[in-house]
Image (cartoon, helix red, strand yellow):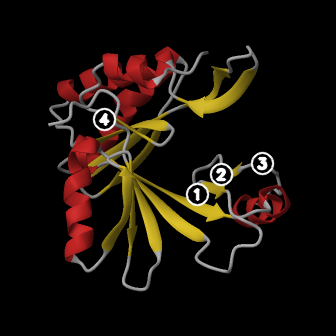
Amino acid sequence: MDMLMGDKIAEANLTDWRKLAQGLHARYEVNDFTTGARFIAAVGEAGDEAGHYPSVSMGTGYVDLKLITNDAIYRAEDGTEHVVEWPTQQDVDLARRITEIAANHGLAADPASVSQFELGLDTPNAAVIAPVWAALLTGNPSSGDEVRDATGRVPNLWFGSADVDEEPRQRFHVEVYVAPEVAEQRIAAVVAAGGTVVDDSDAPSLTVIADQDGNTGILCVEMFGVKEA
């Protein structure tokens, strides 16, 4: 099934959901464990009907869901097909159904609170070191420009470019994906805590921040479908 580009996801108007990194994310507030369990059971029935399921986690007061298609098709300009993890129409359809289920259960969505955490590692030797990190994180020494754990136990690890002659510096950085409506507030909180904005040339999509020791991280926001003030 073809991956959906940003404009198509925006056109779906999934008010309860936010696109973070590769998936669609939603959080619903629940008063107790039983309420959450009943909601998850109903979502499971919808998944049975669709033949497709979200990833689900539940904690005190919330149920988190993530929708993604593991074998979405990306077509390059030359017509070459690539299998990627990305939302497709089946994810949009199931997201709409889950929104209906939540409403029927009297649950409120809290889309501003969703987030996704990933890691980045800058290196001139991605092909060489990738198997090491894949083996450490997942137990499978596969190669490539990223490391993904199919079970979701550890964050995705991306490899970025670095000059082989560059002096040693910070190589690892965190990448934090948040909903667009909270990005400004998150950056303000970082600055109030003593951090600095190092590079906002690609803001609001990407904002590089640093702590007092110079360690950097990136705040990431999917901006499609968002109207700027």
Local secondary structure at mark 3: loop
Judging by the rendered image, the residue that carries numbered circle 1 is 153
At a point 37% along the width and 45% down the height, the residue shown is 205
Q: Which mark is residue 7?
A: none
Local secondary structure at mark 1: loop
Judging by the rendered image, the residue that carries numbered circle 2 is 149
Disc 3 residue type?
Gly
* Marks 2,1: beta carbons within 8 A: yes
Q: Nearer the viewer, mark 2 or mark 4?
A: 2
Q: CA distance from mark 2 to mark 4?
A: 27 Å
Q: CA distance from mark 2 to mark 1?
A: 7 Å
Q: Which mark is residue 144?
A: 3
Residue 57 point in image, percent of width and height: 41, 49
Disc 1 residue type?
Arg
Quarter of the rendering containing residue 187: bottom left
Disc nearer the start of the sequence (2/4): 4
Q: Nearer the viewer, mark 4 or mark 1?
A: 1
* Marks 4,3: beta carbons within 8 A: no
Disc nearer the start of the sequence (4/1): 4
Quarter of the rendering containing residue 212: bottom left
Judging by the rendered image, the residue that carries numbered circle 4 is 39
Disc 2 residue type?
Asp
Residue 100 point in image, percent of width and height: 25, 21
